[in-house]
Image: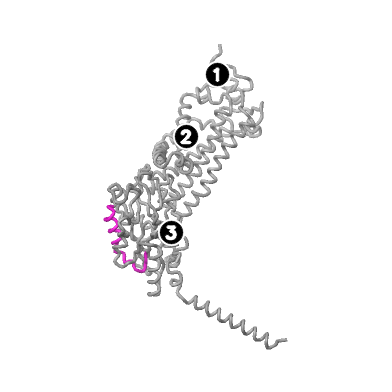
């Protein structure tokens, strides 16, 4: 079984935000929630880099470790998902996540954050695949339809890659070898043991 | 003596070393990126720790691209906080059981006289139980956030446990106000009885009078141990309230680092608080005959009062008659 991952080639990202828009539209993400965001570091200065960031579906996921109600689970594809029926909105996953992936529908005073929402790698939630109940809570389940996450599908420069970790790591390595430079797959050393493993 | 053979051997070694040097040099000349194509260490290095940038969405907080501190927070919480904290509570319970087995119940040595005097007024008792009941709910729901996943979840299943924890979280948030009010009233009512004085030295010398039968250091309304409890509750409640309200109003008063610190402080101080109150509950119920009445009915036996709070009893009994006197 493939181990699904995102890979962001920061040398290619042009900060067009198409991934963000695609994600919001495909998953009907509520207002105020951004499952994916593009952050521009050193904006306007030498060494400017834009990076599209969402849940990295970590190998040893911190959210999963700290959740008081154990609402996270990992699919056979290595995607980290959670149950909104079990989530109590405590916010611990947000404090633990290195990537700022967990999102909450409300500001959250008095613990009223609401159920946590995050990137599902376009693979829904615990409900039956591609049911209305699943879509309403978690958005699209493209993986069940044999498709990859729409954010990466939409990326015009192919900066954002999604798919089998070994395959996209190889694509990136070939790219770097051909062009002669590459500043690295953002977040990989944090999310996965041994970086690429390639 | 240098022979031709040894000379040749030295030459061969030199050539091998030279070859190795060339290989190493070439390896170093190859761009680092080509060696480790998907390792973002180089990128992190180039950014010099700049992990925050600009976003075009309204949520400016999301400009923080990566926060490595999250992993340290997780390791602290899942590691020392839970393990030391959990074992501390186990140790306190085991310690209290062992103490009870060894010392038994502290009896009123003069026997119950049947006559009582009022130890705590209705206002005092209301304040105590307001604080106590809310503390018990806060303590249980708080411990559940840390230990429930391991201890209760396997017993009742994920749905029931998530429901229970959610109720616990709401109770925890709202009962905090009752608790803070209770502690505030306590401070107002009991502060004047809780300043340490010369008398307390005797209490410490006698080990609180709890270690041996027949030892009763003189004490006013509160003995030194109770004064320590009072101040520990004041300090504990202050720390819990400040760190707790930071968590209840996320990111209003603190940034990410502040939120993470608040949670750790809240957990550690909460566990210490529970450990302290376990000892308080023990001595107030099982550990000492007649003690519970002080907060239960508010009436304590005169002999109990004379043994445990001699100066207070003398003062109280000086003018007024005890209930039951005829």
The local crowd at label 1, few if under 14, some if 14 to 19, many if 20 or more residues have their Cα within 10 Å, is many
Above or below, A24 against B305 in this view is below
Q: Pick the quarter of the image with the C terminus of chain B.
A: top right
Bounds of the magenta segment? A8-28
Same chain shared by disc 1 and disc 2:
yes
Marks 1 and 2 sit apart, C-alpha to C-alpha, by 29 Å
Q: Are marks 3 and 2 on the same chain?
A: no
The foreground one among B17 and B157 is B157
- Badge 2: chain ID: B
Residue A67: x and y, percent? Answer: 43, 47
Q: Residue furthest bottom?
A: B4
Query: Which of the two discs, 1 and 2, labels the residue nearer the N terminus?
Result: 1
Q: Which residue is mark 2?
A: B136
Instruction: For the N terminus of chain B, give its image quadrant.
Output: bottom right
Q: Which mark is residue B116?
A: 1
Q: Is residue B243 magenta?
A: no
- Chain letter of mark 3 equals A
Name the residue carrying label 3: A191
Q: Is residue B209 visible?
A: no
**Which chain is disc 1 placed on?**
B
Q: CA distance from mark 3 to mark 2?
A: 39 Å
**Residue at the right extreme?**
B1
Residue B323, position in %: x, y?
53, 16
């Amino acid at each position: 079984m493939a181990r699904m991952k995102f890979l962001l080639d920061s040398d290619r990202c042009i900060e067009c935000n198409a991934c963000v828009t695609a994600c919001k539209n495909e998953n009907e993400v509520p207002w105020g929630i951004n499952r994916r965001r593009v952050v521009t570091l050193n904006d306007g200065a030498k060494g400017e880099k834009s990076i599209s960031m969402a849940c990295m579906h970590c190998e040893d996921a911190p959210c999963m470790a700290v959740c008081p109600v154990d609402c996270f689970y990992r699919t056979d594809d290595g995607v980290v998902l959670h149950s909104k029926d079990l989530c109590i909105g405590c916010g611990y996953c947000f404090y633990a996540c290195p990537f700022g992936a967990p999102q909450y529908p409300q500001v959250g005073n008095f613990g009223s954050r609401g159920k946590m929402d995050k990137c599902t790698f376009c693979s829904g939630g615990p409900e039956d695949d591609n049911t209305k109940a699943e879509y309403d809570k978690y958005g699209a389940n493209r993986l069940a339809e044999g498709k990859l996450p729409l954010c990466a599908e939409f990326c015009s420069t192919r900066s954002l890659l999604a798919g089998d970790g070994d395959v996209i790591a190889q694509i990136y390595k070939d790219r770097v070898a051909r062009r002669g430079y590459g500043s690295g797959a953002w977040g990989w050393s944090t999310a996965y043991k041994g970086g690429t493993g390639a | 003596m240098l022979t031709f053979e040894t000379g040749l051997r030295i030459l061969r070694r030199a050539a091998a070393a030279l070859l190795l040097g060339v290989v190493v040099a070439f390896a170093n000349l190859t761009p680092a990126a080509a060696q480790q194509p998907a390792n973002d260490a180089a990128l992190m290095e180039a950014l010099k720790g700049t992990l925050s940038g600009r976003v075009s969405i309204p949520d400016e907080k999301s400009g923080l691209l990566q926060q490595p501190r999250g992993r340290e927070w997780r390791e602290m919480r899942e590691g020392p906080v839970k393990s030391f904290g959990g074992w501390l509570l186990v140790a306190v319970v085991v310690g209290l059981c062992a103490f009870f087995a060894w010392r038994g119940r502290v009896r009123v040595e003069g026997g119950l006289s049947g006559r009582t005097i009022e130890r705590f007024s209705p206002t005092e008792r209301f304040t105590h139980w307001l604080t106590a009941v809310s503390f018990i709910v806060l303590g249980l729901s708080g411990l559940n956030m840390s230990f429930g996943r391991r201890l209760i979840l396997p017993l009742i299943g994920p749905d029931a446990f998530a429901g229970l924890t959610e109720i616990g979280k709401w109770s925890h948030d709202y009962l905090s106000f009752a608790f803070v009010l209770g502690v505030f009233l306590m401070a107002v009512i009991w502060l004047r009885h809780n300043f340490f004085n010369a008398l307390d030295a005797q209490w410490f010398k006698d080990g609180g009078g709890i270690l041996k039968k027949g030892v009763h250091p003189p004490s006013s309304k509160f003995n030194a141990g109770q004064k320590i409890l009072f101040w520990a509750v004041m300090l504990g409640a202050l720390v819990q309230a400040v760190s707790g309200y930071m968590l209840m109003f996320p990111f209003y008063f603190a940034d990410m680092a502040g939120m993470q610190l608040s949670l750790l402080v809240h957990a550690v101080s909460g566990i210490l608080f529970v450990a302290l109150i376990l000892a308080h509950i023990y001595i107030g119920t099982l550990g000492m005959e007649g003690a519970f009445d002080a907060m239960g009915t508010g009436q304590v036996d005169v002999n109990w009062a004379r043994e445990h709070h001699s100066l207070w009893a003398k003062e109280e009994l000086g003018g007024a008659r005890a209930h039951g006197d005829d």
